[in-house]
Amino acid sequence: MSLRSRRRFTSAAILAALFIPCAAQAHSFGRMYNLPVPLWMYLYGAAAALLLSFLVVGYFVTVSAATASRPPRDISDGIAARLFRRMLPWLQGLSLLCLLLCLATGFFGSRDPYRNFSMTFVWVVFLLGFSYLCAAAGDLYALLNPWRLIARGIGRVFPGYERGRLAYPPALAYWPALGFYMALIWLELFFHVRPFSLALLLLIYSGINLAGVWLFGSAAWFRYCEFLAVFLRLVARMAPLDYRPATRPGERGRLLLRAPFTGLLQERAEHWSLLLFILFMLSSTAYDGLHVTRPWYMLFWGDSTGLLREWLGQSPIYLFVQLRPWYLAYETLCLLLSPFLYLAVYLFFIALAKALTRSPHSMKHLALAFAFSLLPIVLVYNITHYYTLILTQGVKIFSLLSDPFGWGWNLFGTAGRFRAPFLPEMGLVWHTQVGLILFGHIVSVYLAHVEALRLFPGRGKAVLSQLPMLVLMMLFTVAGLWILVQPISPG
């Protein structure tokens, strides 16, 4: 099963008494936790902090400060950059080795997901840990993408392979990447992936990538279609390090140092599909937290509206077996529609900003201009929901490295290390989550205000335009904290 499913199972088992009225509980913790103060105090405090940050930013950040561009510092000749260039071929080889090892352990290793290297490496070390590394160190995936490296190797044997056969249709934009991303989240939430099925999925995805490069060329495919490249490229925009590849033969790439998050101000979203991709990064994390909670579970099986009871003749919980496939279809539909629901809410507040300022800019222009300001919220939501998995399951990768197939090996002498999960104190986890969510929203408030100063004439209109966005940030904050404290469903 996937690591998200494990979190649900563990939490549900420990929260067996969830139907007994109790105080708010943080569902990420895996066991009961009473908040030190009522939830409403956290919500009011977070909203007040956002309002204060909005007032401070609106007063002190001026048009000249927003438009002044502090050039990033070139550190290409620094010790760290030179060391990285020397290590790059080894890191690329390690990337290919990890892909091959995931395939081998998935097909031939233990069927126990806790003893198989591929499960922990893919779901925790790569999808979580490597994403956070890219948020700090830049788009490393562009250099280490194993499928890009394989395509490059094929191109050396068969010249012209990477150029593709067809021009990439502009109308496709980022829709393929969004489709692959949705497929991954659905598989992760509902497919109960095992080591063998994970290896099969990796093999199929490898074939799709190589076929896509053959059809559309390497540059177009990895820019628009390979969803991990799109996802990690967006995450890397928040990093203080920015790698610029060489543009001409004989040149070498440059490594630049910039202020954190300023990379989000350098470009704007170029298509509706990229905006929806960003919104799905946000909505899928919120949905993953929401769909395992008691309120969500009771919405369908408890039939709070009474509609299902009237239609079926009895409570749906008594027809669990018969309705389970329909419940899966219901959950799937909600997942797939989630970014479009977020888009509707987002466009509503963009329309308010446009109306308040009487801006001549189109809705599309404004919506795409502010899209990247949502990415800090995306990052902190992801961290708050999943970083405990790195502490509980991710650390076990050191043990699995010595016994990747689960056959009882001890190749590096670490097979017995970090078997027990590291469980931080629950109060620390909760306050870390609150702090991260608040920090991400404050950064987004700042970025949105800077973007508004660029778009709207005059400081007054820029501040006015951000009043609806401030309300949107507050709604996101309240929703994020509310989801975190919901009890886990036993279903």
Image: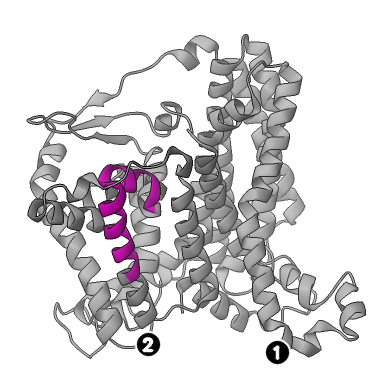
Q: Quadrant of residue 136?
A: top left
Q: Amino acid at mark 2?
A: Asp
Between 165 and 206, the one nearer to me in the picture: 165
Image location (x, y in percent) of residue 9: 56, 80
Q: Relative to 264, is 409 on the left or the right? A: left
Residue at the (65%, 43%) spot, across then down: 343
Vertical placement of residue 39 versus 351, above or below: below
The quarter of the image holding the C terminus is: bottom right
Looking at numbered disc 1 in the image, what kind of residue is underneath it?
A: Val
Q: Is residue 30 above or below residue 236?
A: below
Verify CB contact (< 8 Å) between mark 2 and mark 1.
no
**Residue that sits furthest to the front in the current view:** 165
Element carrying mark 1: helix
The quadrant holding residue 11 is bottom right
Which residue bears the numbered disc 1? 321
Q: Is residue 397 magenta?
A: no
Residue 81 vertical position relative to residue 112 in the rendered view, above or below:
above
Q: CA distance from mark 2 to mark 1?
A: 27 Å
Q: Residue at x 63, y 12 (%)?
A: 459
Left or right: 57, with 105 as reference point? right
Residue that mark 2 sits on? 112
Query: Residue 80 location, x and y as percent?
Result: 15, 40
Q: Which residues are magenta?
A: 204-226
Q: Residue at x 41, y 38 (%)?
A: 238
Q: Secondary structure at mark 2?
A: loop
Position of 395 with respect to 321 (left or right) is left
> Is the residue marked by circle 1 packed among few (<14), some (14-19), or many (20+) residues within 10 Å?
few
Q: Point out residue 237 in the picture as x, y percentages from the top left corner.
A: 39, 37
